[in-house]
Image (cartoon, coloured by chain):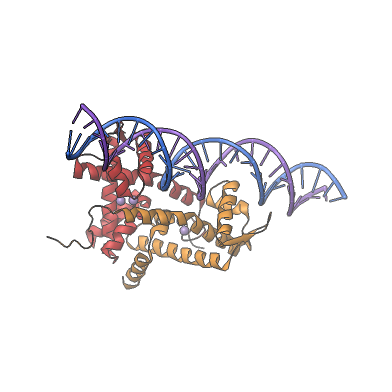
Chain colours: A orange, B red, C purple, D blue
Amino acid sequence: MSDNTADEGQVPTPERFTQARAAQSMAVLEDYAEMIDDLAQEMGEARITDIAARMGVTHPTATKAVARLKREGLAVSRPYRGVFLTEEGAALAARVRMRHRVVVDLLVAVGVPQETAEIDAEGLEHHVSDVTLKAFEAFLARR
Amino acid sequence: MSDNTADEGQVPTPERFTQARAAQSMAVLEDYAEMIDDLAQEMGEARITDIAARMGVTHPTATKAVARLKREGLAVSRPYRGVFLTEEGAALAARVRMRHRVVVDLLVAVGVPQETAEIDAEGLEHHVSDVTLKAFEAFLARR
DNA sequence: CTTGATTTATAGCCCTGGCTACATTTCTGT
DNA sequence: ACAGAAATGTAGCCAGGGCTATAAATCAAG
Ligand SMILES: [Mn+2]
Ligand SMILES: [Mn+2]
Ligand SMILES: [Mn+2]
Ligand SMILES: [Mn+2]
């Protein structure tokens, strides 16, 4: 009895966790890309010190994150100079910013206070799939 | 112009990221606690092999996670025997399961397909604050 | 009761993302 | 032009969460 094709709140399948881990491994990249883009707009360029301050980490931590961005082809920089996003990095930042905004908007739409929405969205955004994002946009458009 | 007390989609503040990192550091603990609780109900006890299979990791990884649970007072176990949650661990598992269910229900309520909701919820749940959870429950109750 | 399969433990490796401490470079003001 | 301040780089530490390979214990049959 009851349809057994999809699981409906039953036993979690391993793929769920694998997927959540994959999403998490992108989170740092996404947040730094977005932040570098923010700083580029505000200040013309993103300096390591500013990135670190905004991310709430020390500068060696920011340096490591930028190194990973560079390694993955999302950013470029020369020693003692600012960090700049590649085209791919800028595209990622744009997607991430849009997703962040949609998540916040949806949270607010269902009754979450704005400030709480902003805080929670910072973690939530990295786990919103394209399908879910589209559903959020549709909900916001129709409500 | 415009009230500057709360930030309304402006520059992210470092605390947001600090908060997201704190939430993430609880994620593994939460998922394992819930899984151990699942297995205890299904099979009477949670064996390392079963925990690993369900979490989609190898058994040494599961052993490490259980070691952390024990270290934090959330579980107990004797060598070569099953893993059991402490009272505190069981309480955590209960909260986590409830939150997971509410998140899935909210996603479905705004139009996300059930299966996608289950997958996304596995990552999202760890970043839903109490305030947001309450808002979700209120939305579900009133809609 | 012994043996082979299964389960669990342990060692040791990798990567990530935090940190502090210290070296080096760049910038700024006189 | 230089000195001191500020920014950046780098080394090295730690914890967490993955993994493989191997050892040891437990379990299931015969
Ligand atoms: Mn984020
Ligand atoms: Mn964001
Ligand atoms: Mn989860
Ligand atoms: Mn869950």
- Locate residue B8, reporting x and y percent: 46, 60
| Left or right side of A95 for A67 | right
| Left or right side of A60 for B95 | left
- Locate residue A113, reporting x and y percent: 37, 56
Q: Is residue D13 above or below residue D10?
A: above
- Locate residue C1, reporting x and y percent: 21, 27
Query: Which residue is situated farthest in the bottom direction here?
Result: A142
**Count of numbered tags:** 0
Query: Which residue is situated farthest in the left direction here?
Result: A1
- Locate residue B59, reporting x and y percent: 35, 43
Residue A69 seen by the camera: yes
Image quarter in which the N terminus of chain A is found: bottom left
Image quarter in which the C terminus of chain A is found: bottom left
Instruction: Name the residue: 49% across, 62% down.
Output: B2
Q: Quadrant of residue B51?
A: top left
Observer-nearest of A9 and A72: A72
Instruction: Name the residue: 37% across, 54% down.
Output: A18
Q: Is residue B68 above or below residue A60?
A: above
Instruction: Name the residue: 24% across, 52% down.
Output: A11
| Left or right side of A49 for B41 | left
Observer-nearest of B55 and B100: B55
Q: Quadrant of residue A72?
A: bottom right
Instruction: Name the residue: 14% across, 61% down.
Output: A2
Residue A115 seen by the camera: no
